[in-house]
Amino acid sequence: MTPGRTPDLSTLSPARRRRVIDALRRGAVPESGLGVLAVGLSRFEAAVDAELDAIAAGGAVFKAVRGEYGSGKTFFTRWLGERAKLRNIAVAEVQVSENETPLHKLETVYRRLTERISTSSFPPSAFRPLIDAWFYALEEDVIAAGSGEEDIATAVGRLLAERLTEVSRTAPMFASALRSYHRAQEAGDEGTAEAVVAWLGGQPHVAAAARRSAGVRGDLDHFGALGFLQGLLTVLRDSGHPGLLLVLDEVETLQRVRSDARDKALNSLRQLIDEVHAGRFPGLYLLITGTPAFYEGPQGVQRLAPLAGRLATDFSTDARFDNPRAVQLRLPGFAVGSLTELGTRVRELYASGADAPERIRAVVDDTYVTCLAHAVSGSLGGKVGVAPRLFLKKLVGDVLDRVDQYEDFDPREHYALTLSPAELTETERNAAARPASPAPAESADDVELDV
């Protein structure tokens, strides 16, 4: 989408348009409908589409995204997720954190994956519907092969064993639990079926009776999680989903954990990357996000030389010439111009479903959107890169909503920007506490001298 061009809003239904606006009003990144808001991402389209096509063909991809707070890392991953779902690829977004999802415990990462997995047809968690779809596909295959009604269960069991032969070598319990789930479903034993699928999803503390019926013991561990991920990719592929986009978000939080846990987590990441490149996970697109400090600082990637070598990317040239095919992508962040373009797209999106679209376009014109972009970034110490979340929140909730509801509301006359500490994140509060840098002088006559 070229700068300044009105976005194509026909791709969004009224319901999706409303969900996008509601998310922006809350100061959150929308879960879908991001194509019409994608400012500055066209440079990545060809490369990521080629990678998604490779995933759909059975390949595997690892990618690292870097950007400061406010540069749009979460937006980028969800935009990529939408493009993945257009190819019927499943998507799971997992936030890495010291207590909830420590990266050095891959069984926890796998559990969060199964809790968050979604497809174009199923919202999170789509884990059980995907397993049911897989068994349905197996039944369709055995019926197509000529099996009679009385032989279907036996034939499905045989086909299940065939499809999971490779996975069974490294994760035999995955195949065993799937068989047990199928038996429970056939017998109408919903309690056992639910418990077994919970165990398959990596949930701890599953009832011992259900585990015994499945022929499995204990809870999933770090190494078993890799085998279960293989099994999940097989289930996805055979149920019509050629791959999985797995996003590990906010990996920079590793810098704040204990040194021993940090080193284990970095080694786990290195292990995952190597497994992806070795072809162990056909159909997996593994994406991590982090700040430049995580990739270059002493408490991040640089602590583990083999990992640093795998992620090394040359960013010494002008950002205009960054290589979108490289292992690491640099998000450009926002300037006032791109922030204004984003604001005008949001205004058009809002107006297309508003009660007074023409009034909105007339009162909240491009000049006003630019003024608001300057005002918000100025209130945050001039740091435009930190401003997008608050800018869109204020634009929608404080300006567009009021213009739409009140005929005589004019933001130039009736609205003054205010930022309360309660609505700011820690990064935004830190930016707001610093005075904005003065604008650079345009000529020597503009420079003030002490006399």
Image (cartoon, helix red, strand yellow):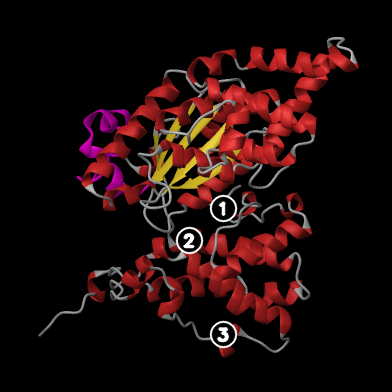
Q: Is residue 370 visible?
A: yes
Q: Position of residue 100 (x, y in %)?
A: 43, 51
Spatial CA distance of label 1 from label 3 is 26 Å
Label 3 sits on residue? 412
Residue 201 vs 347, above or below: the answer is above
Q: Which residues are magenta?
A: 290-316
Q: Residue at x 38, y 69 (%)?
A: 428
Q: Is residue 195 magenta?
A: no
How far apart, in angstroms, are the residues tagged by discs 2 and 1?
10 Å
Disc 2 + disc 1, Cβ < 8 Å: yes
Which label sits on residue 3? 1
- The percent coordinates of residue 52 (x first, y second) are 57, 30
Sort mark 1 into few (<14), some (14-19) or many (20+) by Cα contacts within 10 Å: few
Question: How far from the left and from the top, in percent, is residue 336?
Answer: 45, 64
Residue 105 in which image quadrant: top left
Which mark, by number, is residue 337?
Answer: 2
Q: Amino acid at mark 3?
A: Arg
Q: Nearer the viewer, residue 232 or 12?
A: 232
SS at circle 1: loop
Residue drawn at point x = 63 percent, y = 33 percent: 89
Residue under the point 33% across and 42% down: 318
Gap between marks 2 and 3 measured at Cα: 20 Å
In this rendering, the answer to whether 149 lies above or below 400 is above
Q: Nearer the viewer, residue 114 or 444?
A: 114
